[in-house]
Image: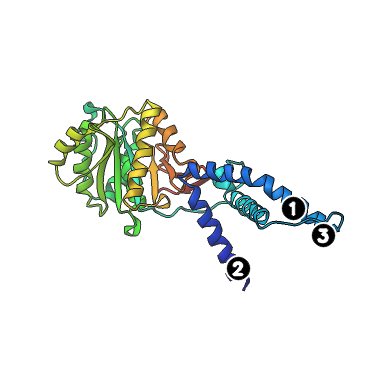
């Protein structure tokens, strides 16, 4: 019986928190409702005390009881969702390795054209076998720290979430400099035969957010014609792209708890925007260390840091 009660309580808490995530207007509406009902609730409590103590004959109206009920329900709701509304410091126990998520958003950094050929590092020939290539690139980094390929970490991020075929989509946001290199990334992605669909996203040249699925090299024409590369050093612009992309994904039926944003490829401003957009949402942000290849997951609402050990 106690187990059922705990499950019911957990369901109510999860449902309540899900209602306010991504809906800041709802918090304001409930706040106004709490304030408006407070006076009537207080008066009802006062009259009830008078009635119980028999000091003054009085009558509690149904309207007053309604005010009190609304006040108590909204107060309880705010208490339940406090973690999702108010950021607070607290100690969190180790949650272990995070589970892969179905939808991954990546920031694509620009490659130095001098050090690559069609996006591939000049110091190593990619084989199309992901595990072999990542191990080889890791050994090269250890032996020659200056030999690095920026897109290696993106492949590590994809591999982690592709475990057990969990990953369904990879959405890439390009910078103004890397938009022309998207064809390279699309080809390399295809060579590894990832089952997840690949999209390139950004501000549409006409209006709104634009997501284009990568099929073949012919897709690059549509990408160049319809998508504007984002300025990774402009907080307002990159934050706006994240916001509108998450709204677009919600309309497509992709829930916040299924989405993760990898900000490894972005510059510092883009990284701040990526982490910031997850505040008080079930979307989380991740970073793949360029030093030890460790994947770190950040849940800003609960102030958690999860680690996935590198292979």
Q: Is residue 309 left or right of residue 140?
A: right
Marks 2 and 1, how far apart in space? 30 Å
Q: Earlier in the sequence, mark 3 or mark 2?
A: 2
Q: Residue furthest right?
A: 55
Q: Residues within 10 Å of mark 2 (few under 14, many from 20)?
A: few
Nearest the eye: 23 or 112: 23
Quadrant in the picture for the N terminus: bottom right
Q: Residues within 10 Å of mark 1 (few under 14, many from 20)?
A: some
- Residue occupying the point 36% across, 32% down: 238
- Tag 2, which secondary structure? helix
Location of residue 207 with respect to 97 vertically, above or below: above
Badge 3 is on which residue? 52
Nearest the eye: 55 or 211: 55
> How far from the left and from the top, in percent, is residue 133?
27, 46
- Residue occupying the point 27% across, 28% down: 176
Residue 231 visible in rendering: yes
Q: Is residue 308 left or right of residue 55?
A: left
- Residue occupying the point 50% across, 45% down: 26
> How far from the left and from the top, in percent, is residue 47?
77, 53
Q: Residues within 10 Å of mark 3 (few under 14, many from 20)?
A: few
- Tag 1, which secondary structure? helix
Are the residues flagged by discs 1 and 3 in contact, CB closer than 8 Å? no
For residue 45, the mark is: 1
For residue 74, the mark is: none
Badge 2 is on which residue? 5
């Amino acid at each position: 019986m106690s187990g059922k009660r705990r499950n019911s309580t957990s369901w109510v808490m999860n449902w309540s928190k899900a209602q306010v995530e991504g809906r800041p207007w709802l918090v304001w509406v409930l706040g106004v409702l709490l304030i408006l009902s407070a006076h009537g609730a207080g008066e009802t409590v006062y009259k009830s005390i008078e009635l119980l103590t028999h000091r003054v004959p009085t009558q509690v109206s149904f309207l007053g009881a309604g005010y009190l009920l609304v006040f108590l329900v909204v107060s309880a709701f705010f208490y339940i969702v406090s973690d999702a509304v108010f950021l607070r410091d607290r100690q969190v126990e180790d949650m272990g390795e995070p589970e892969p998520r179905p939808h991954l958003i990546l920031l694509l950094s620009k490659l130095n054209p001098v050090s690559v050929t069609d996006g591939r590092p000049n110091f190593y020939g990619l084989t199309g076998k992901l595990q072999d290539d990542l191990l080889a690139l890791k050994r090269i980094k250890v032996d020659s720290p200056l030999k690095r390929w920026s897109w290696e970490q993106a492949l590590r991020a994809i591999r982690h979430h592709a475990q057990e075929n969990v990953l369904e989509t990879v959405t890439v946001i390009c910078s103004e400099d890397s938009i022309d290199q998207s064809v390279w990334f699309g080809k390399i992605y295809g060579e590894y035969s990832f089952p997840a669909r690949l999209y390139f996203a950004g501000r549409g040249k006409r209006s709104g957010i634009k997501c284009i699925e990568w099929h073949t090299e012919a897709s690059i024409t549509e990408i160049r014609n319809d998508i504007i590369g984002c300025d990774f050093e402009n907080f307002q612009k990159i934050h706006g792209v994240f916001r509108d992309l998450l709204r677009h994904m919600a309309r497509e039926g992709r829930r916040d708890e299924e989405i993760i944003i990898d900000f490894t490829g972005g510059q510092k401003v883009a990284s701040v925007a990526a982490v910031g957009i997850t505040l008080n949402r079930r979307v989380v942000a991740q970073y793949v260390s360029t030093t030890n290849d460790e994947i770190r997951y950040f849940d800003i609402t609960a102030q958690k840091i999860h680690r996935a050990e590198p292979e």
